[in-house]
Image: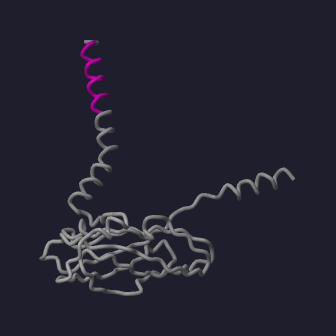
């Protein structure tokens, strides 16, 4: 009977470890799956040199619309300077966005992009984007940010328009080490 209990405990422990490992690797696997299929509206990132080496399809244009949103927990205004443009696939394009803090203190935000339709998202590649890093705004501060992108000429012909959407979310920022040092030094005095 003891060997049966040991086998059961070993089996159940092994299953628990396997399930934990599977859950741990599921997020990176999902990200790779989304990158390959374009599911979830994820966009690609390429270098400026790669973008410049693409051939233009001057006989074709694609409409790109810009949608901007701010999560209710972040007191910012956010909009695209241009709501809609027509782009030539293969040509590098730059678009500006403006963000303004309505807060009385320093705030931090991160923009999460998505492209629709999902079928077109894997052909939308950015070389530079404010969404690559966290943004910081002081009280009432206003900032102009840009996105450089290229629509791959291999975009299926039936896709005639794309929507690039950004949603800014609030980010928590830890107290800087400078402030910690000041508190420690003031306690010594």
Q: Residue at x 24, y 83 (%)?
A: 63
Residues 165 and 81: in front is: 81
Q: Is residue 37 left or right of residue 43?
A: left
Please provide the residue range marked out in magenta.
Answer: 3-16
In this rendering, is residue 15 above or below 172?
above
Q: Is residue 12 magenta?
A: yes
Res 53 quadrant in image: bottom left
Res 54 quadrant in image: bottom left
Q: Where is residue 102 in the image (x, y as percent from the top left)?
A: 56, 81
Q: Where is residue 167 in the image (x, y as percent from the top left)?
A: 39, 72
Q: Position of residue 147 (x, y in %)?
A: 40, 75
Q: Position of residue 182 (x, y in %)?
A: 76, 57
Q: Is residue 100 magenta?
A: no
In this rendering, is residue 188 above or below 13?
below
Q: Residue furthest right?
A: 189
Quadrant (top left/top right/bottom left/bottom right) for the N terminus? top left
Q: Which residue is drawn at 18% across and 71% down?
A: 155
In this rendering, is residue 76 above or below 41?
below
Residues 154 and 12: in front is: 154
């Amino acid at each position: 009977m003891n060997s049966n209990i040991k086998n059961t405990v070993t089996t159940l422990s092994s299953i628990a470890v396997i399930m934990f490992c599977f859950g741990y690797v599921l997020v990176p696997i999902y990200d790779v799956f989304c990158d390959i299929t374009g599911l979830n509206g994820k966009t690609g990132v390429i270098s400026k040199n790669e973008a410049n080496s693409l051939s233009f399809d001057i006989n074709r244009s694609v409409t790109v619309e810009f949608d901007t949103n701010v999560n209710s927990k972040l007191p910012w205004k956010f909009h695209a300077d241009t709501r809609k443009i027509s782009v030539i696939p293969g040509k590098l394009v730059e678009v500006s966005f403006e963000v303004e803090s309505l807060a009385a203190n320093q705030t931090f935000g991160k923009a999460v992009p998505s492209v629709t339709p999902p079928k077109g998202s894997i052909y939308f590649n950015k070389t530079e984007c404010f969404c690559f890093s966290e943004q910081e705004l002081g009280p009432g501060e206003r900032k102009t940010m840009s996105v450089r992108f290229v629509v791959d000429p291999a975009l299926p012909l039936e896709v005639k328009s794309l929507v690039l959407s950004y949603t800014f979310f609030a980010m928590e920022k830890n107290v800087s080490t400078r402030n910690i040092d000041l508190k420690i030094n003031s306690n010594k005095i």
